[in-house]
Amino acid sequence: MKFRFIAFTLAFISISRALAGAYESLPDTISRLNEIVKSAGSEPKWACVTTGNKSQPSPAVGRGTKSENRLWQNAGFENAKFETWPADMLYEPSIINDPGFTHEIDLSVVLYRGTSWDKESIRQRFKSMAKVLRQCKLKISKVKFIEADAYNGWLDVDGVIRKNGDRESQISEALPIKSRPVFVYLRSSRLTATGYAIPQYVVEESNPAKDTIWMTELSQQLSPNTSLEAHELAHVLLNSGHVDHGRNRNILHIKPNRQNNKIGNERGGQCDQMKKYGAVRSINTKD
């Protein structure tokens, strides 16, 4: 009996020492586990961006929620990836909180995988457009960016809007994004256009392609001194075609050699008209 008691006591002491050693090494174990997780790439995908004097995490970039992925997949846009560009990805820190901005707008982008377009070049083009819109005190508040496989494999579109059957209308109807304006970056159009907009006056009110903008690879060859995105967006916001501004250069001048980034900001001019577009919101209680 005494022998069993001694054996039990020795076993208890041995187990206690082992537990104490494990407890003391717990921080090292946790640290090692963290290193393993990081090396495996399972670390949360958050990046720190600076907004003014404050730092905050930017939205995670990834495949979206299961329901969001299912929605796009069922709509015919496979392998969709989602990202949101806040204003601090489009403006310099000194400009983001500029009190001169009176209005704002949200925009959407769909990039077709398999083209020569890439996310960063599009973001740079949107930064150029943001500078142009600043003339009108109009701020791009955020951009919803989606990269996906082309609907029906259509990397090219018709370039001609018909009552029925054109690819632009079919793609627009299938798009899970129903807010407008939306930019679609693809390979080409059959009319070899660089980029083109479909403002309301071009189609019937019920046409799903209304207020969509289509950017082809050819637009990459144009001069970077003018923003084609701003030009096409102006068509949509103003619900207008090209206009004869005489000898004055303008963003929608009917003569291509007189088109530039200038938006008419006189009273009742193009800037005032842009602010009447449905998706443009006032951010100044005085306006």
Image (cartoon, rainbow, N blue to C red):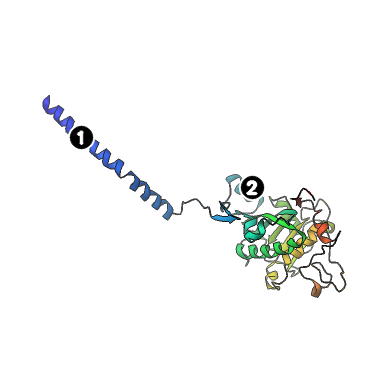
Give the number of the mark in front: 2 or 1. Answer: 1
Q: Which residue is mark 2?
A: 71
Decide if residue 185 is on the left or right side of residue 20: right
User: Is residue 186 something that shows in the picture?
Assistant: no
Closer to us: 252 or 210: 252
Q: Residue at x 60, y 64 (%)?
A: 120
Q: Which three-letter amino acid code belongs to the residue tagged 1?
A: Ile
Q: Distance from label 2 to label 1 (Cα)?
A: 61 Å
Q: How packed is label 2: few (under 14 Cα within 10 Å), some, or many (20 or more)? A: some
Q: Quadrant of residue 27?
A: top left
Give the residue at x 62% y 47%: 68
Q: Is residue 253 left or right of residue 12?
A: right
Question: What is the number of the mark on residue 13?
Answer: 1
> How far from the left and from the top, in percent, is residue 266?
84, 62
Q: Secondary structure at mark 1?
A: helix
Question: Image height check: is 57 above or below 260?
Answer: above
Q: Secondary structure at mark 2?
A: helix
